[in-house]
């Protein structure tokens, strides 16, 4: 049973087909340790918190096994489901008795909490039973159902166990009975069930679920749940001109619409997805791939509204951004989607979990004074299991196949066995990516002859080179896939070189908060200046001197990272003491030249607190 | 009966004593038309809305005169009270039969709605009666009471009518009975009643009200209402190190504490007020005098957190900033408080009302793309009557007296009769302020001989000159009062010249949103660039060239304003199309030199919609 992250094998409107997680074995210094940590630290510690916070008890209570009140927020079931999904994908990558035992226990609790009629939500039990489906806008019933379906599909794919899948099918049938065609017109306040229903359809073959997903995408924007942008109910999806509203809701809806499109090929869906993607990427996305400019309503902001200190950039929104771009990539094979997927994965999303694997950010500012710190859990704990499932997806997002051959999307030292063209090929990546742009891929075909290997050339590269057995491949352009087609022979060697040199980025002039500021990029990684590495000057007072950057690998630091060093002018803000505004030139700040060290953004806030900044001032006329 | 704005005549810990509104007659082109508009347009149109929205009906309903449900928000009574306060101060300045009739009608409704036991709040009637004082944190009962007291005091001072004052006294006695010393420990979730109780004490001489005000200031920070910064309940007032929480709540509390201090002289209150004022003015105030950086919680932000597009800067907070600084000024006679008062009055607050006098801003961004427009009313309509009462205060905030003589705080062509030293003096200001920095003041003393005239030299001036009968006065420094002491004779002429020349301001380097940006100031006014005056280039794309500014009075524009013109580089952002981030230098924007025109910030959004910006880019190396 192949454990793919989104199963589009039989989907008519996709180009690419994911390679199952179990076929990939990482041996790199970046993802392999994170997958190990996921199983050893993150999943067990999260399970403990699911227990301690009553989330698992809610299921036991609903099953009549224990007494007492429902605990926590109305959508707390979803945290358990997301955890089960994460555990399942993790188990596909690496069997672990303890995690398997915990997952089985959680699933047992879930299954036993289901009503005879298929309904399953632990809040709507006992005295709350009469409230079922009474407030679709606010109470997250289908949102929770969606996470149940995703967990069930993941568990079935990863372990072959049907227990949760059967519960999911019963509940989905129940929902179809209530909200299916010609039944009650309802739609949930939090998109999520759409993509889940499509996957449940793919797993079971029951077309009703696809039908239902399509209905739920199309029922939005008709005011059934109040008509607010927050709930993505302001406009029918196909007519949405801009990506607005609650960031996670918006991006989950786009995931669902993409999944529906891959099945039904509705051109209007495709056009809307493209329009919304462009709106996001060209106007509303943080340089980290994070999304959501406003604390108020956890919302996507206006075009170019990208505040740094007050960025919301919820971890879940970055996870959703990866998920959406993964689907767009499967649909099209276009490298721009892989670029955003990689960006959000390595930066906006990964910043959401500590290096220790058990502390989390919900909100991800791009500048801070040292107050914002990771937490072990949240009352609304959507982010911790979301980042867990994302890390579990990673081995499944490195490769895909198409009719023409094998596609490489992410680089990481690894070995993969990939079925293609009725035969298979073993690819062995040797690389220190993301710390080095040199990748060597050994190709071992079995039972196939001519096929293509599509090599992703990231959009951030300036100069890239691809060679096969020492011979240069033509047609290598940043932001595209270089197709290398040949009769591959065992031992063929593909050598790829990306220019990883650290670079400075600037923003569209209408991102007013970034005027006169630059961000640092090294390969797929966005950097930040953290106080602990720059003890002599407040990092907010530094102005980077262009042309002075150099990268340096530091094995001892933050689990091993490449730092970016350079020269900066440090402003002494002492002359500003007691002043907030002054006549231009009235305050003469002094400057001195200094060195700075920047670290990857994902790694910030893992040491002592202090100021941090991504968009650092660019040196101008300081002296 | 003198209609003073804050009656501190008998307050032991004040320095200055306001001059009654009725003693001042404006004949300038700035405030006189606004006071006329207040009476002719603003107050009648607001009354109509109080009627149409059910705010007055709520009182009739409570009195049993009509039936039906309570309408609107729980604190809607306060809008009626603020309107009555505004109308009363306006009537002190200029009798107007229509406004007087409306005020009498409103007061009749209010008085008749009062319970026999003195309780008065139209929400807590009939079935809600049992909820009285049950949720002090959220339900604004004392907040409404405070506005009642302020209205009652204003009405009594302005018209001599005791009807509302008697109702206020009855309600205040009721509150004293419930929450007085040794009674129930409660404090309201929204400060306001504190300053109102002190004024009610000053008006009636009943010390219980002062006692109660003091108790309410001191009861904060003990968790009686949940302990949140939003409700200013996180720390006892005297221990507050920083100004945080809901902006209007915070500033109203400071007003109350200042009023209490002027009565009891508690040095800890004084120290706390100073600390919080410095925190505001040195770290948290917009260049317009606006306050409140966050939509979320309508909150004051962190130090230097001053976003422009997403500034909240509620009109009410700017009004409260004026009110607080007026009290600090009365307390101390220090010019820095007059500077902030003038700044918030002419900019942050005045922007809250249209030139037509009947449209309002609740939120006052410092940059916009053209979507933010003034509205005739709001569901939560705190701002419209608040800006109305502030305009009505203006004639009462121009002058004060102290033991040494007369103080001039604001400049406006006007005549005032000021009682001082047992005699009086008539001062006639001839000036085009705020469009000109030249002020001529004719002095006509009656029955007094030697006394001082304290001439405010605003902090924003570079070069100022004061002459008496052509003789230069020494000791004239920006940000202070120049004391001119002499035996004044009828016909003595005081000539004051401020350098009004337009200037550029910059921000503390930690205001990261203003990096590379400057604001324009001309005299007391902050300017903005609005699209309609700059048709050739998006004003967000302009970069002002320092040293090119000049002022030009335009009688035809926006009711007559001085515009600031200058040179700018206009960026053609076309090269950025489709890009949000780029490698530094990758996108080569083209620039061309152009002229720009800026208008006073208070006057924006009175013509066709379009982009607006206060903190405009400063030209650097464009070519």
Image: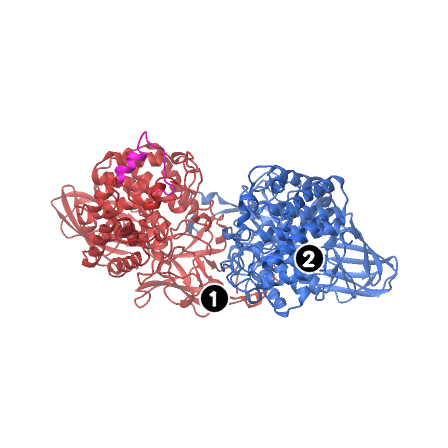
Chain colours: A blue, B red
Residue A473 in the figure: left or right of residue B496: right
Q: Measured along the vertical axis of the image, is residue B250 above or below residue A17?
A: above
Counting from the top left corner in percent of width and height, residue A136 is at 54, 54
Residue sitting farthest toward the front: A116
From this viewpoint, which residue is outermost toward the top?
B182
The mark lying in front, picked from 1 and 2, is: 2
Mark 1 surroundings: few (<14), some (14-19) or many (≥20) residues within 10 A: many
Residue B279 lies, in percent from the top left, at 42, 42
The answer to whether any part of residue B297 appears in the image is yes
Is A595 left or right of B357, judged from the image as shown? right
Along the viewing direction, whichever of B41 and A471 lies nearer the viewer: B41
Chain letter belonging to callout 2: A
Taking B26 as reference, is B231 above or below it?
Answer: above
Q: Which chain carries label 1?
A: B
Q: How far apart are marks 1 and 2 (CA)?
A: 47 Å
Closer-to-camera residue (A200/B318): A200
Q: Few, some or many C-alpha atoms within 10 Å of disc 2 (few <14, some 14-19, many ≥20)?
A: many
> Does B175 lie within the magenta span?
yes
Residue under pointer 1: B538
User: At which x and y percent is residue B525?
Assistant: 35, 56
Say which quarter of the image contains residue B611.
Answer: bottom left
Stretch of the chain drawn in magenta:
B171-191
Image coordinates for residue A388, horizontal then vertical, percent:
67, 46
Q: State the residue position of label 2.
A: A199
Q: Is disc 2 on the same chain as disc 1?
A: no
Q: Is residue B13 visible?
A: no
Viewer-nearest residue: A564 or B17: B17
Res A208 label: none
B11 part of magenta stretch: no
Instruction: Left or right? Give the position of A76 relative to B155.
Output: right
Which structural element holds mark 2?
Answer: helix
């Amino acid at each position: 049973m192949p454990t793919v992250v989104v199963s589009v094998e039989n989907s008519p409107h996709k180009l690419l087909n994911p390679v199952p997680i179990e076929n990939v074995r990482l041996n790199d210094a970046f993802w392999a340790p994170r997958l190990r940590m996921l199983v050893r630290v993150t999943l067990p510690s999260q399970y403990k918190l699911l227990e301690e916070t009553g989330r698992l008890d809610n299921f036991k209570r609903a099953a009549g096994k224990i007494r007492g009140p429902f605990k926590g927020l109305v959508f707390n079931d979803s945290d358990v489901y997301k955890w089960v999904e994460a555990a399942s994908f993790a188990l596909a990558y690496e069997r672990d008795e303890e995690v398997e035992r915990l997952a089985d226990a959680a699933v047992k609790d879930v299954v036993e909490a289901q009503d005879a009629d298929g309904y399953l939500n632990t809040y709507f039990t006992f005295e709350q039973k009469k409230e079922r489906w009474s407030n679709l806008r606010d109470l997250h019933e289908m949102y929770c159902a969606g996470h149940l379906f995703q967990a069930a599909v993941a568990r079935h794919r990863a372990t072959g166990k049907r227990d949760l899948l059967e519960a999911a099918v019963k509940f989905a049938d129940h929902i179809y009975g209530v909200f299916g065609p010609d039944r009650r017109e309802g739609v949930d306040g939090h998109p999520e069930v759409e993509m889940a229903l499509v996957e449940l359809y793919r797993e079971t073959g029951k077309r009703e679920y696809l039908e239902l997903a399509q209905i739920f995408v199309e029922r939005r924007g008709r005011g059934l749940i109040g008509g607010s942008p927050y709930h993505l109910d302001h406009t029918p999806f196909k007519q949405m001109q801009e990506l607005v509203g609650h960031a996670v809701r918006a991006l989950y809806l786009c995931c669902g619409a993409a999944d529906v499109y891959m099945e039904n090929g509705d051109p209007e869906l495709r056009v809307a997805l493209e329009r919304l993607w462009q709106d996001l990427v060209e106007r509303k996305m943080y340089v980290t791939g994070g999304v959501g400019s406003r604390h108020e309503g956890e919302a996507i902001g206006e075009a170019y509204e990208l505040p740094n200190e007050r960025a919301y950039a919820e971890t879940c929104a970055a996870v959703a951004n990866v998920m959406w771009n993964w689907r767009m990539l499967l649909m099209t094979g276009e490298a721009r989607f892989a670029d955003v997927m990689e960006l959000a994965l390595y930066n906006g999303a990964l910043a959401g979990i500590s290096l220790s694997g058990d502390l989390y950010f919900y909100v991800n500012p791009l500048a801070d004074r040292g107050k914002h710190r990771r937490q072990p859990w949240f009352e609304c704990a959507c982010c911790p299991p979301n980042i867990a499932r994302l890390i579990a997806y990673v081995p499944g997002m490195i490769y895909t196949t198409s009719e023409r051959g094998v596609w490489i999307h992410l680089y990481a030292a690894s070995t993969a066995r990939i079925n293609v063209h009725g035969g298979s090929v073993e690819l062995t990546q040797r690389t220190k990516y993301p710390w080095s742009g040199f990748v060597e891929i050994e190709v071992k075909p079995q039972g196939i002859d001519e096929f293509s290997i599509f090599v992703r050339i990231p959009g951030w590269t300036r100069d890239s080179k691809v060679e096969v057995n020492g011979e240069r491949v033509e047609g290598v352009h940043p932001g595209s896939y270089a197709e290398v087609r040949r009769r591959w022979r065992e031992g063929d060697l593909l050598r790829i070189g990306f220019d990883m040199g650290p670079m400075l980025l600037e923003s569209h002039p209408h991102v007013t908060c970034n005027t006169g500021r630059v961000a640092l990029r090294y390969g797929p990684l966005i950097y930040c200046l953290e106080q602990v590495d720059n003890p002599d000057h407040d990092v907010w007072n530094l102005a980077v001197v262009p042309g002075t950057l150099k990268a340096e690998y530091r094995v001892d630091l933050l689990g091993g990272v490449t730092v970016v060093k350079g020269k900066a002018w440090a402003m002494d803000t002492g002359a500003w003491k007691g002043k907030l505004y002054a006549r231009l030139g009235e305050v003469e700040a002094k400057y001195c030249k200094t060195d700075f060290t920047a670290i990857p953004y994902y790694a910030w806030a893992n040491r002592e607190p202090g100021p941090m900044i991504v968009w650092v001032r660019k040196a101008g006329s300081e002296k």
